[in-house]
Image (spheres, rainbow, N blue to C red):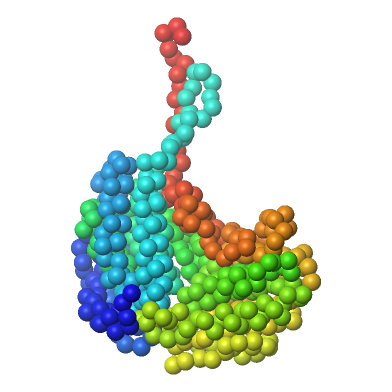
């Protein structure tokens, strides 16, 4: 493995993108305005990027619409679309280290996570959806002998893809994979804080043979780019991942424009239930550590609330404390670092406010350089604190004792969110009953995770609706379903 100096040297030598991609051409914003994208670890300016506006949105949507209507991608044979998408995955793989370094610099994510998780999973997602292109069948409805009902899938059209800052490359892959596989053309708005890898992938997509106008990228702020995409009358659908407040705005934009379809994947306040019969508390603590502290807790499916049976609460807290201390805080370009900076000074200020107030800090609580918070465990005796009600989006986990599985499930459901949950128990029946009773889109049993590329990801309640990321279900939100009803009765053939 490369050492710290090697990563820093290679990161310094990177050529970072500085232009948007519209209709296959690198270009500045029509206004000529730019904004700085910063390294969260150091505060230094990485690049000046185009600050797009509504005029740029109009230009990109027009290019995407023309590319869709003339069929250069939407009417391409599925096997040919698959070939191009597999080529894109291959080209990304060839540039994996460059993208990992770029992602770490731009987002503060640890280089180890970027190299070992984000980039490989993005590649795997693209490959998975590419392989699905020519394997999703249309249907024939049951009908009488004089009729034939065909149910066909058609690409929905021009799609706006609005990305979050916490997993820039991976969320890009989750969305462009099924959207492009379906035959749609896309206008992508990466998060203002983390635009670099999206721009680079769009460049690589052209190298892979994706036609001009199919994959457009606009950089800039929400009011200047996101809202015009949401309101644009020639955008047929928007897939958004981000905060619940912004998701509400996209519903408003749709209702006040062309009623475009909107798919939302938003926040979470995810519970983890630990019962007194678990055979290995060390393993449980390790899973909770991954769930709570991975990506600095900046994860919509992060474990944020732990409900543990009071008979094992003390021992679990000891194990969790040991685990938390193994999450090394440091320079994100150091391969030994597991906790890097939060995405921005503003987000650091928000998250660090949760280090104060009620609850007993069991371990952690320290801050570094105005950017980083060490893994923190806070013990509570009740479920009314803001810590266990609000989405923190940082490396802070709350632990509450319970007397029964029923109590734990009841508390787990006391939230406006319903994205993910975990249940740890040796009793399979109890685990399944609890998993069925918890109102969440993904429930893991005796582990933490989000499934794999073949399993859908999305939430209940205010965690989102309208579709799912990952799996074949992700293709549905980028397709229209059409019925073709054929009358076979006017025949003189005698049969």
Is 179 left, or right, of 16 in this rendering?
A: right
What is the x, y in percent for residue 145?
51, 18
Q: Residue at x 48, y 52 (%)?
A: 454
What is the x, y in percent for residue 394?
53, 79
- Res. 62 image quadrant: bottom left
Q: Residue at x 32, y 87 (%)?
A: 44
Total of numbered circles in the picture? 0
In this view, which residue lies farthest toward the top? 494
What is the x, y in percent for residue 250?
48, 64
Q: Nearer the viewer, residue 177 or 96?
A: 96
- Res. 365 image quadrant: bottom right
Q: Nearer the viewer, residue 119 or 409?
A: 119
Classify 363 as above or below 253.
Answer: below
What is the x, y in percent for residue 193?
38, 77
Q: Quadrant of the N terminus?
A: bottom left
Classify 142 as above or below 304.
Answer: above
Q: Is residue 270 visible?
A: yes
Q: Residue at x 23, y 58 (%)?
A: 206
Classify 283 as above or below 83.
Answer: below
Q: Residue at x 42, y 41 (%)?
A: 136
């Amino acid at each position: 493995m490369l050492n710290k100096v090697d990563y820093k040297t290679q990161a310094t030598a990177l050529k970072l993108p500085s232009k948007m991609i519209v209709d296959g051409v690198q270009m500045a914003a029509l206004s000529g305005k730019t904004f700085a994208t910063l390294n969260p670890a150091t505060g230094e300016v990485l690049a000046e990027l185009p600050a797009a506006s509504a005029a740029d949105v109009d230009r990109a949507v027009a290019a995407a619409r023309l590319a869709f209507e003339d069929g250069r991608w939407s009417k391409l044979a599925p096997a040919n679309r698959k070939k191009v998408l597999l080529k894109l995955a291959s080209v990304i793989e060839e540039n994996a280290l460059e993208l990992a370094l770029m992602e770490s610099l731009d987002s503060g994510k640890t280089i180890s996570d970027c190299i070992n998780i984000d980039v490989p999973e993005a590649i795997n997602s693209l490959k998975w959806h590419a392989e699905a292109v020519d394997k999703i069948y249309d249907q024939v409805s049951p009908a009488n002998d004089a009729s034939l009902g065909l149910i066909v899938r058609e690409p929905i059209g021009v799609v706006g893809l609005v990305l979050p800052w916490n997993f820039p490359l991976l969320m890009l892959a989750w969305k462009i994979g099924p959207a492009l596989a379906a035959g749609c053309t896309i206008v992508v708005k990466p998060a203002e804080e983390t635009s670099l890898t999206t721009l680079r992938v769009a460049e690589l997509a052209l190298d892979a043979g994706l036609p001009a106008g199919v994959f457009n990228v606009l950089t800039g702020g929400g009011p200047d780019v996101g809202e015009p995409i949401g309101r644009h009358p020639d955008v047929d659908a928007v897939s958004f991942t981000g905060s619940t407040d912004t998701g509400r705005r996209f519903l408003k934009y749709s209702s006040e424009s062309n009623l475009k379809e909107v798919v939302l994947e938003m926040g979470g306040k995810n519970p983890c239930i630990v019962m007194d019969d678990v055979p290995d508390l060390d393993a449980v603590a390790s899973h909770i550590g991954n769930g709570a502290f991975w990506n600095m807790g900046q994860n919509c499916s992060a474990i944020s609330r732990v409900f543990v049976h009071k008979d094992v609460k003390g021992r679990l807290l000891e194990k969790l404390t040991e685990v938390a201390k193994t999450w090394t805080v440091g320079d994100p370009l150091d391969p030994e670092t597991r906790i890097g900076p939060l995405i921005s000074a503003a987000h650091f200020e928000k998250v660090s406010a949760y280090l104060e107030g009620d609850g007993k800090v069991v371990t952690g609580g320290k801050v570094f350089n105005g950017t980083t918070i060490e893994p923190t465990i806070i013990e509570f005796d009740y479920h009314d604190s803001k810590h266990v009600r609000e989405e923190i989006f940082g490396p802070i986990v709350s632990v509450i004792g319970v007397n029964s599985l029923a109590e734990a499930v009841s508390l787990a459901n006391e939230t406006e969110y319903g994205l993910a949950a975990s249940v740890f128990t040796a009793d399979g029946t109890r685990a399944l009953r609890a998993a069925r009773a918890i109102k969440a889109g993904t429930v893991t049993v005796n582990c933490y995770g989000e499934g794999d590329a073949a399993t859908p990801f999305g939430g209940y309640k205010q965690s989102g609706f309208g579709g799912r990321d990952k799996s074949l279900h992700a293709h549905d939100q980028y397709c229209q379903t059409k019925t073709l009803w054929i009358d076979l009765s006017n025949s003189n053939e005698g049969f």
